[in-house]
Image (spheres, rainbow, N blue to C red):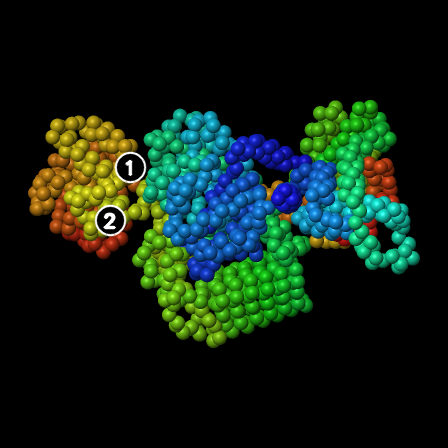
Amino acid sequence: MPGADKETDLSERIEAFLADLKRGGSGTGPLRGSGEMARETTALLRRITAQARWSSAGDLMEIIRNEGRRMTAAQPSETTVGNMVRRVLKIIREEYARSRGSSEETDQQESLHKLLTSGGLSEENFRQHFASLKANVIEAINELLTELEGTTDNIAMQALEHIHSNEVIMTIGRSRTVEAFLKDAARKRKFHVIVAECAPFCQGHEMATSLSKAGIETTVIADAAIFAVMSRVNKVIIGTQTVLANGGLRAVNGTHTLALAAKHHSTPLIVCAPMFKLSPQFPNEEEIFHKFVSPHEVLPFTEGEILSKVNVHCPVFDYVPPELITLFISNIGGNAPSYIYRLMSELYHPEDHEL
Amino acid sequence: MSSRGTKQKKGNVTNEQEEEDQPLQAVLIADSFNRRFFPISKDQPRALLPLANVAMIDYTLEFLTSTGVQETFVFCCWMSNKIKDHLLNSKWCRPTSPNVVHIITSDLYRSLGDVLRDVDAKTLVRNDFILVYGDVVSNIDVSQALQEHRHRRKVDKNISVMTMVFKESSPGHKSRCEEDDVIVAMDSKSKRVLHYQKTQGLKKLQFPMNIFQHGSDEFEIRHDLLDCHISICSPQVAELFTDNFDYQTRNDFVRGILVNEEILGNQIHLYVTNEGYGARVSNLQMYDSVSSDLVRRWVYPLTPEANFTDQRGQGCAHSRHNVYRGAGVSLGHGSQMEENVLIGRDTSIGANCHISNSIIGNYCTIGDNVVLDRAYIWNNVHISNKVKIHQSVVCDGVLVKEAVLLNKQCVLAYNVVIGPNMSLPEGTVVSMHHPEEEEDDDDDEFLSDDQVVGNSKDKTKQKAFNPAEVGSEGKGYIWKASLDEAEDEELAQCIWGLVLNPDPDSDSESEASDGSQDMGSRSVSPEMDDVKGNVTPEMDDVKGNVTPEMDDVKVFQLEVLGTLQRGEEENIGCDNLVLEINSLKYAYNITLKEVMQILTKVVLEYPFQQQGTKLSSSQYTVLLLPLLKKWSPVFKNYIKRAQDHLDCLSAVEELFLEQETHQTAMVKVLMNMYQLEILEEDAILKWFSAGATTDKSRQLRKNQGLQKFIQWLKEAEDESSEEGE
């Protein structure tokens, strides 16, 4: 039966993706860039939409929610996956509403009145069957994929508005988005980049090599020197792993130090973050927030006897509160941290915040 | 992205290209073939024992799957049904699993060698495969090692047969297993193993000179390596095990290959990594340290909260100080989980408890005011109030009653009841099985130790529990550690490993490694016993009745005899004799040690051979002495190192133990050999003082002549040392 074949093929793909997620990030955070992760997740969700058995939007949403739950559980620190699941759920809602011909659903404004009147009924509404729904949803997901492809370019295009000639810019660790951003600016302007190495994984070294290859004047400093060097810096430009619902960041270790130093010297702190990193998550959810990896990089296993006498921890992420951030640059433009809540409600349906 | 990430990716890409035609295979041995975990392993095979609440075999399978293995053969022997059930219910046997698991069970496996011979017989592997035990915990990325291995095999045509994966870690590391400590000499450039030796119990290390003459200008001697028990093998490994039926363990194999390197042309290589984690849970000490490494996240991403086995409800939350809590854990008022604590699902803990560095399983109940430090508590355990447990293992279903104190290194096996109000001394092992149950079976040492006991279950004699041992309401028997003199030394070295091992027979592996200077010869099969001259009555007159299936050793012995006869008749020079014996050695694949023993035996028996066994002692010596003198250069050629002297002496001793009537001649022979400078006085003295193991040999040593001779030697030594001053 070709149908059964398709299904096993699909579930095999899902399992492989889950296993990949679980093993992902041995040490330094994501194995792949989160952009790639977002695209892969979306492509997988498109496949599920195309191949799984469902008759109504409600069924499909249930399937995707289930798979989404498993994916996020496999690697809670990889928030991009959950975000993409939410985006797809939102797409299904919209397409369903369009098929029904009601445009109300699309401009869902959460007024108190509306919450009271329509609460609980929304799921019921998704039971209706539309023949064209599948094609429409897939079409919409394809659009999302195209959008994802272009995010880095979109962000990099704004570089010239933010980086001026002869500025000193500081960054930390390695972020692909920031890398593209700086390289784009370097095509027209001359400036100096200081990279904090971001021990113990020292992704900063790679960043510096890559930047200097592009002809940018680059200096690597130790993390401990961040404060000392800050007085010379005109702008801090960093990437992040996740943008939280309150406008804060979950970024690579050492970012908080950098942000505090920038605040002290009143240096503007700019975060380059594509929209798919926006996550409806608050920093108080302790279990999924932090991630500890093997302490090998801090104190090598070869060290011997001392290891049985000490406890070594190797956390990966820092929380940066929103008040330390000056500006977010996303693929749809610059935003202040206080505006994040608004973007959030545009991207995700409030019922999908909890998968 | 990190450098590591890119490396891994690159490795995967190239691997995939090669793997497209051939899936990567692995052989997983879910049996330990020893009884280190006895009596725990009596109720549950070792591969299924929980390590941080997950069965050990799951870690191994996860490791294999993550390295890209697509087909795994799991071999089980002891309690194979349990392992099978476990695997069938796990995610590994789901149709979507990227790693296809085949389970192969047989009660006939007694060692790693048997399994690999079966692999060969069934031609299961078609390409390079990974060989691991079911109790290996690792996150090492072996794709690099695999690539090196394949490259070597491509470059010089199947010469390299095995690549062993080692992890760098300096001596004294708690995750290094004393029993597996090795010293390795290797070529720095080609990573070829030149010499491999277990160091347990050795005070002196010896390296054969020829390893330094191999023509490579750089080599390393390393002691900072931790054996991960992961080896990448080519299909020839299985064939080699078939060809050499006496190979039981990987240790035998490695030594055998190294000794016969020139003849067979096989080589073994090493892959040393300093990233990742790899260790084998080979005894309880290792269980302790691997568990704590897991909780301290050394094996990331195989961490307790990752729930890689994909079981419902297994997940737990990780919070500060490496405290992990499963679903439905309740913690009483004032209880503290200090650090490195893992608590399984639906476990409830009472008030004012103090828990540190411990792992607690699922569905346990723990009372008030309990102190747990380095305790490993498995599932469904009830611990009452005021109990204190230090560095101990408490298995499933145990009931610990009020105010019990478990001192260090106690083991409470399945369903034991202890207490109330008592304290168990250090190293106590309590089990529901009576220790005498399997003593009846002890004589059959060739059976897998685990295996033996399985049959005896029905024989269980219901004996009363001793309330002094397990408390007034207790249930269980104390297992005493056997304190044989021979074992004392080892006991001190790896306490938790050996206390649990009350049967000296099962120790054959480590005993063999003690004498590891004698490269690769072990008395494993009865056919070989006669070579070493063990006193097996039916083997006494070996040459008279050669059994139809003559093995190499016997044929070799006959050949040596023939050579010597011809040598005497045709008056061939000693150099030519040596040459002939050497070529025979290679032809029959005999180790140097055996050559020497056989040579000694043949020469000493030569007079009997020529004149019949009815000779008197004096006639015998008259006939023998000129022969000894004549052939002394041959002896000198083979007897060089101190160990060789001892081996030669033991061969002499064994021969005279058999020929009891001629014991008086022994002194003369020894004297003669000493004067001909075949044997050194130090060696003789050492042999005399150390060698007595059986009653007979002790008696032999009481022989008057011999004692006089020794006396004389000692005096001579004193004199010479005085002269020296």
**Direction from residue A131 to residue A293 in the image, left or right:** left
In the depicted structure, whether residue B83 falls above or below residue B232 = below
Most foreground residue, B713 or B10: B10
Do pointers 1 and 2 mark residues of a single chain?
Answer: yes
**Direction from residue B209 to residue A216 in the image, left or right:** right
* Among the two numbered marks 1 and 2 on one chain, the one whose residue lies closer to the N terminus: 2
| Residue B518 percent coordinates (x, y) | 32, 41
Count of numbered marks: 2
Residue positioned 25% across, 52% down in the render = B692
Most foreground residue, B150 or B680: B150
Does residue B431 appear in the picture of this structure?
A: yes
- Mark 1 and mark 2: span between their CA atoms? 18 Å
* Residue labelled with disc 1: B590
Location of the N terminus of chain B by quadrant is top right
**Direction from residue A3 to residue B45 in the image, left or right:** left
Subunit of label 1? B
Residue positioned 20% across, 35% down in the render = B559
| Residue A205 percent coordinates (x, y) | 68, 33
* Residue labelled with disc 2: B534
Q: Secondary structure at mark 2?
A: loop
Most foreground residue, B165 or A114: A114
In the depicted structure, whether residue B339 falls above or below residue B236 = below
Q: Secondary structure at mark 1?
A: loop
**Mark 1 crowdedness (10 Å alpha carbons): few <14, some 14-19, many ≥20:** some
Most foreground residue, B489 or A3: A3
**Amino acid, disc 2:** Asn
**Amino acid, disc 1:** Ile
